[in-house]
Amino acid sequence: MKKIEAIVRPEVFQELRESLVHIGISGLTVFEAAGCGNQKGKRGAFRGTTYELPLVSRIKVEMVTDDHKVDEIIEAIIEACGTGNVGDGKIFISQIDEVIRIRNGERGKEAVL
Amino acid sequence: MKKIEAIVRPEVFQELRESLVHIGISGLTVFEAAGCGNQKGKRGAFRGTTYELPLVSRIKVEMVTDDHKVDEIIEAIIEACGTGNVGDGKIFISQIDEVIRIRNGERGKEAVL
Amino acid sequence: MKKIEAIVRPEVFQELRESLVHIGISGLTVFEAAGCGNQKGKRGAFRGTTYELPLVSRIKVEMVTDDHKVDEIIEAIIEACGTGNVGDGKIFISQIDEVIRIRNGERGKEAVL
Ligand SMILES: Nc1ncnc2c1ncn2[C@@H]1O[C@H](COP(=O)(O)OP(=O)(O)OP(=O)(O)O)[C@@H](O)[C@H]1O
Ligand SMILES: Nc1ncnc2c1ncn2[C@@H]1O[C@H](COP(=O)(O)OP(=O)(O)OP(=O)(O)O)[C@@H](O)[C@H]1O
Ligand SMILES: Nc1ncnc2c1ncn2[C@@H]1O[C@H](COP(=O)(O)OP(=O)(O)OP(=O)(O)O)[C@@H](O)[C@H]1O
Ligand SMILES: [Mg+2]
Ligand SMILES: [Mg+2]
Ligand SMILES: [Mg+2]
């Protein structure tokens, strides 16, 4: 199984959600975040403090999925979240060794669905 | 070392915390999250916006631990967080290559304790 | 590529940010968190509830980077975030299989920069 982490602009999240449901992905977890990419910036705020190095508001979407769905999900993220402007975000793919459904202890690919 | 990520209902968190301490696990990090599993839903809210596709409030608990403790931790999570109802959450297990204790630069299994 | 996760005290974050920029690391994502290490504690609060087992406010900084930068980043974190007191935090290193820049679909090491 793979974990797909997408760090995206908050304003594209609803469109991403709809695209993912469209390709059969309903299981996901979302986190509020702040981040910085390559942009040379001026100032920003996080937790009430002003930083010389700006942080912008981002959302991280985490999805654990079967290997064969990864490419389709990447395409859906690029389609829904890409504006062509700097700051569109990043996708990180990593290995997940085991998944367990807490309700019944079910493991593996069946637990992802 | 392994990372155990448990996405659970907020209301079971205190019981989980106590169970983990009971089996000797005190190091953990907790995040507020929102998520969706397999449920076919109606509406929900996240960051003040209403979504057709509902997100429910969840907590993610992250623990990095020695390999031999993983099964015991999974059992403790299922015991503390399983209600038998849909939406009880998921556990994801993955590999951690290195751990460093920032206080003294200590690495490896000793740094996890 | 590697993911570096650093769980640190909120008050050292700005110094960490500056140190990272100094060594050429500008891409990172930050999350508010709560956590507990080895300390034997009394009480704490999270989400408005009092817990017998205390949680303290922490920040998680996530950076995905090329393998050859990992050691330099670890040193910068220890330097910026280590006070020598218990509770300074932890660093976790793990493998990232693929990185995609959402703006243009670029992959691999070029997408990390
Ligand atoms: N190497 C990285 N590690 C962790 N998070 C990152 C990294 N690079 C970017 N991010 C996250 O992604 C968000 C968006 O980054 P961004 O798209 O600006 O990256 P970029 O490399 O500057 O690409 P672009 O040139 O398209 O702007 C950042 O605010 C940050 O949260
Ligand atoms: N594949 C997944 N990837 C990432 N997060 C997930 C995934 N599946 C579930 N989650 C997270 O776990 C939470 C609870 O999911 P849930 O227990 O409803 O999963 P489920 O597969 O529908 O299982 P059940 O049939 O027991 O309800 C979700 O709100 C979401 O935050
Ligand atoms: N094993 C772990 N898994 C996940 N998060 C951890 C773990 N250990 C510590 N943390 C996180 O790091 C934060 C700081 O931990 P802390 O530095 O107190 O660790 P420690 O092992 O007690 O080291 P020290 O002896 O230097 O205090 C915690 O509040 C928690 O968020
Ligand atoms: Mg950028
Ligand atoms: Mg469900
Ligand atoms: Mg401690």
Image (cartoon, coloured by chain):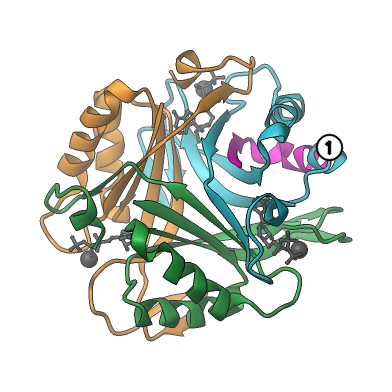
Chain colours: A orange, B cyan, C green
Q: Which residue is mark 1?
A: B23
Q: Say if residue A48 shows up in the picture.
A: no
Q: Is residue B104 left or right of residue C98?
A: right
Q: Secondary structure at mark 1?
A: loop
Q: Is residue B78 above or below residue C72?
A: above
Q: How far from the left and from the top, in percent, is residue B110?
A: 72, 54
Specify the quadrant of the image occupied by residue B79: top right
Q: Is residue A54 above or below residue B111?
A: below
Residue in the image at 62% along x and 35% along y: B8
The span shown in magenta is B1-19
Asked whether mark 1 lies closer than 8 Å to ligand 3, one says no
Q: Nearer the viewer, residue A52 or C66?
A: C66
Q: Say if residue C111 shows up in the picture.
A: yes
Q: Dividing the image into 4 quarters, which one contains the C terminus of chain C?
A: bottom left
Q: Is residue B74 above or below residue A93?
A: above
Q: Is residue A26 above or below residue A41?
A: above
Q: Is residue A62 left or right of residue B61?
A: left
Q: How far from the left and from the top, in percent, is residue B67?
A: 66, 35
Residue in the image at 50% along x and 57% along y: C5
For label 1, the crowd category at 10 Å Cα-Cα, with few meaning under 14, some 14 to 19 and many 20 or more, is: few
Magenta-drawn stretch contains B14 = yes
Identity, as a three-letter code, of the amino acid under mark 1 = Ile
Magenta-drawn stretch contains C102 = no
Q: How far from the left and from the top, in percent, is residue C78?
A: 57, 74
Specify the quadrant of the image occupied by residue C43: bottom right
